[in-house]
Image (cartoon, rainbow, N blue to C red):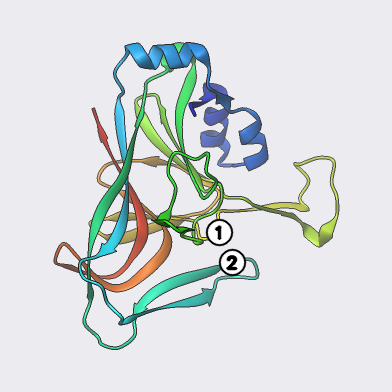
Amino acid sequence: MDITLPFIHLEKIIETQVVDRKLLNEHLNVDDPEIILFKKKEPPRVKVTFSRMEPKEPSDEVEVVSFPVNNDSRVEMVINSKSGKPLQYHLTPIKSCFLWDLHQFKKVDLLRCGRFKHNDFLPLIRENPLEMDLGVSREHSLIGFYNSKIYYIDYGTSTRYAKSQEVSNPAQTNLTHFGSKNGSWLYQDYIITDCIKNMCVLWEIPTVVGIGTFFYNVSINDKKLKLFHHFSFSYEML
């Protein structure tokens, strides 16, 4: 499924830092024939890679614990429950997708991530039987190419009305959008630098974006880490 967004809507998000999931989805363009034809003729500008942490060897030394973050969400973490030695993992690329420069159409090319099957990136733990990381929202985030730069939008699926009041105007303060369940986490050299929820950020190399369940006390490529996420994004300019 090919997804784009008119420039004006991303520009508004960047300016205001207000990410309204419902409003955003209303302005997404799906499978525009003109865009599809353009992509068949022109090369992409960006390659986005989605990776999953996988153990180098099977282990029975892990357990999953859950910590409340607030009244609406919890953080799940995989920990080593028997010894203090870091568990050995490697990052396995499970899917790569591409972004095109659509400035001549005044549109932003987008990729989507989440547990809904229509998304470009699915947080698959296993395919048979199907199991996904519940630390990732059904609609978790968007990745867009705009003005020769990459933007990452964390927007999630959790929306509610304070005190269950119905409102006719989405701008009213009793409508609250909480962003994705666990947010998206920014890493540089495997170290967390920030957590974003319901936000749009300029995504620059070498930053890696992590989502889903935390893994505690691990070693990736012989580098010992306190924390890293089950799934992560990286990209390269083509």
Q: Amino acid at mark 1?
A: Lys
Count neighbours of disc 1 (C-alpha within 10 A) and say few if under 14, some if 14 to 19, many if 20 or more.
many
Residue 174 located left or right of residue 102: right
Instruction: Check the image and report above or below for 48 versus 197.
Output: above
Which is more toward the observer, 61 or 126?
126
Image quarter hosting the C terminus:
top left
Q: How many marks?
A: 2
Q: Marks 2 and 1: CB-CB under 8 Å? A: yes
Q: Which residue: 35% across, 69% down?
A: 215
Hey, what amino acid is under mark 2? Ser
Whole-percent x, y for residue 71 in the image:
65, 70
Residue sitting at 51 percent across and 35 percent down? Answer: 14
Residue extending farthest left: 222
Residue 47 spot, x, y in % from top left: 29, 33
- Does residue 166 appear to the left or right of 224 in the view shown? right
Residue 70, given in percent of the width and then of the height, sits at 60, 70
**Residue hosting label 1:** 181
Q: Nearer the viewer, residue 23 or 132?
A: 132
Give the numbered dot on residue 112. none
Of the numbered discs 2 and 1, the one sitting upstream in the chain is 2
Q: Which mark is residue 73?
A: 2
Dot 2, how many residues are within 10 Å of its Cα: few (below 14), some (14-19), or many (20+)? Answer: some
Determine which quarter of the picture holds residue 27. Answer: top right
- Circle 2: element type: loop
**Which structural element holds mark 1?**
loop
Q: Position of residue 178 (x, y in %)?
A: 62, 55
Q: Residue at x 52, y 48 (%)?
A: 140
